[in-house]
Amino acid sequence: MPAPSIKNRNLGEYISGYVDGEGCFSVSFSKRSKFIVGWETKPSFSVSQNYDRAEILFHMQRRFKCGFMRRDFSDRTLKYEVRRLDDLINKIIPHFKRYPLLSAKHKDFQVFCRICFKMMNGKHKNLKGLKEVIDLAFTMNASGRRRYSKKDILNFTNTRMKI
Amino acid sequence: MPAPSIKNRNLGEYISGYVDGEGCFSVSFSKRSKFIVGWETKPSFSVSQNYDRAEILFHMQRRFKCGFMRRDFSDRTLKYEVRRLDDLINKIIPHFKRYPLLSAKHKDFQVFCRICFKMMNGKHKNLKGLKEVIDLAFTMNASGRRRYSKKDILNFTNTRMKI
């Protein structure tokens, strides 16, 4: 039985609908002792699906012309992820501005945009800007787990900046 | 911050994209001693989401003009569900024929259609037809849990029919 054709389909709307359910906009922070502020800011757009239903992830990758696939062997899922700031700003964000999410996830997307544009302007590379980015990031994905608390991150930056 | 407008949106594609991720077409069976074959065949189209992101479920209910909402207090989700055969055949199935799912879930949908049309013709009300419906239903949602095995159902019908 052939897969349904995507010819004459509005794949933009379809992808936004799919992402509204399964997608995630997130911003995480990793300790990087060589960075002036001590932390790397890592925005990410990702969508996961079981291997056997992953066609839509490949449709997305072809459409967005960026990002990579990663297998998660623990739960037998495939994840499509875009991390490169340039791709997020020029390919991912314009898509979701043209076809906005309809759930409350739209708010996460708006915060995500603000962070990406701050990063484009290098704001996250000084303590004041990083603090703004952290404050914004911690309003997103309220139910998500984080490795470091806001306090952990801010304490570490403060210590380093004082040295 | 106002929610994005759905004016000028292709909500049909959006809904299919959303359902491709979060939706479920299923057919379950309940013991009903008063039914001639001893079992009720219950097709269902459902979509679940956390309370705080449930807008899209209400968009669906308004668009499809059928189905009901049910709260699941155990995991804080809201479920939109359509069970009425007439609604499935006249409202839900036509939507997904016009805007087909793009993942392997499309195969479940096709089996679901066959079962609904068999039911419309009353096939599930005799043992031969019920067996066909059961065989089809057990090819769907391979990873889903079922209360009764195929053998349980068939054994029970056989016993009753022999009485």
Image: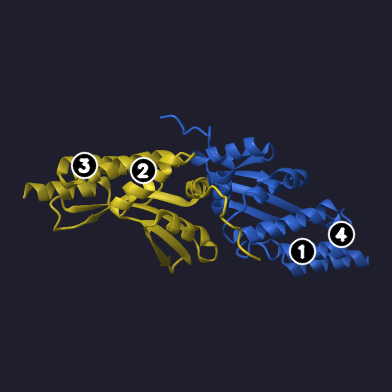
Chain colours: A yellow, B blue
Packing grade of label 2 (10 A; few <14, some 14-19, many >=20) is some
Q: Which mark is residue B37?
A: 4
Frontmost of labels 2 and 4 is 2
Frontmost of labels 4 and 1 is 1
* Residue type at tag 4: Val
Q: Are dots 1 and 2 in contact, CB under 8 Å?
A: no
Report which residue position mark 1 lands on.
Answer: B134
* Residue type at tag 2: Met
Residue A142 visible in the shown view = no
In the image, B58 versus A86, the foreground residue is: A86
- A159 vs B69, left or right, is left
Task: Point out the tag, 3 or 2, that comes first from the N-terminus.
Answer: 3
Report which residue position mark 2 lands on.
Answer: A140
The chain to which mark 2 is attached is A
Same chain, labels 1 and 3: no
- Above or below: residue B137 compared with residue A156: below
Residue at disc 3, secondary structure? helix
Packing grade of label 1 (10 A; few <14, some 14-19, many >=20) is some
- A84 vs B34, left or right, is left
- Residue A112: quarter of image: top left
- Above or below: residue B155 compared with residue B85: below
* Residue type at tag 1: Ile
The chain to which mark 1 is attached is B
Tell me the CA gap for discs 1 and 2.
45 Å
Packing grade of label 4 (10 A; few <14, some 14-19, many >=20) is many
Tell me the CA gap for discs 2 and 4.
52 Å
* Residue type at tag 3: Lys
Q: Which mark is residue A131?
A: 3
Query: What is the x, y in percent for residue A20?
Result: 48, 46
